[in-house]
Image (cartoon, grey):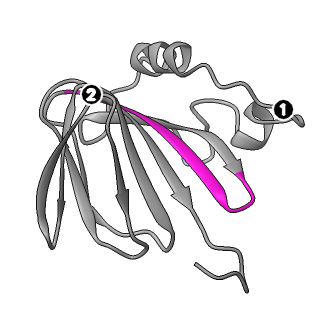
């Protein structure tokens, strides 16, 4: 186990520096899956974009991995890159497969379960103060 002040990787502001950012999702997923520490709740994750009102987080799930129920104060996009994820909300459950994107309204509580080894690009799109929608 790492100490609270010991980082697994460089902080986002160093990884994501510069006026242009090319994100190699395949290479990042390989590196994420190769990390020596155990997965937490059956998944590993890394921020690949943390700028302004936008966040992108890449997840590598083991079969059965999960994210417990939570909500975000902005629009959420769940882009499944590989495998199948079951996303549950108060409206029911949807199985989202590779190449599909599920969009969730702000503050909609949801949980995610990997039905098989799966990869996900999660987007948080926060509204700018004073902007509509």
Compared with 64, 71 (above or below) is below
Q: Residue lying furthest bottom in this view?
A: 130
Quadrant where the N terminus sits is top left
Q: Is 87 or 61 nearer to us in this picture? A: 87
Residue at the spot x=22%, y=27% of the render? 62
- Helix, strand or loop at mark 1: loop
Q: CA distance from mark 1 to mark 2?
A: 28 Å
Tell whether 108 sits left or right of 54. Answer: left
Quadrant where the C terminus sits is bottom right
The segment highlighted magenta reads: 51-62
Residue at the spot x=65%, y=42% of the render? 49
Q: Is 102 or 126 nearer to us in this picture? A: 102
Compared with 16, 131 (above or below) is below
Nearer the N terminus, badge 1 or badge 2? 1
- Helix, strand or loop at mark 2: strand
**Can you tell which quarter of the image residue 107 is in?**
bottom left
**Residue 34 at x, y = what percent?**
43, 13
**Residue 126 at x, y = what percent?**
60, 68
Residue topped by disc 2: 118
Residue topped by disc 1: 20
Q: Are marks 1 and 2 in contact (CB under 8 Å)?
A: no
> Do we see residue 105 in this rendering?
yes
């Amino acid at each position: 186990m790492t100490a609270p002040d010991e980082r697994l990787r460089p902080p986002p502001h160093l990884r994501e520096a510069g006026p242009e950012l090319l994100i190699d999702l395949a290479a990042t997923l390989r590196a994420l899956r190769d990390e020596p520490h155990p997965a937490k709740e059956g998944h590993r994750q890394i921020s690949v974009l943390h700028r302004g009102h936008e966040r992108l987080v890449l997840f590598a799930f083991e079969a059965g991995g999960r994210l417990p129920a939570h909500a975000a104060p902005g629009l959420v996009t769940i882009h499944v890159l590989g495998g199948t994820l079951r996303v549950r909300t108060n409206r029911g459950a949807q199985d989202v497969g590779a190449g599909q994107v599920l969009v969730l309204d702000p503050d909609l509580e949801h949980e995610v379960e990997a039905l098989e080894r799966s990869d996900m690009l999660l987007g948080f799109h926060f509204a700018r103060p004073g902007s509509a929608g």
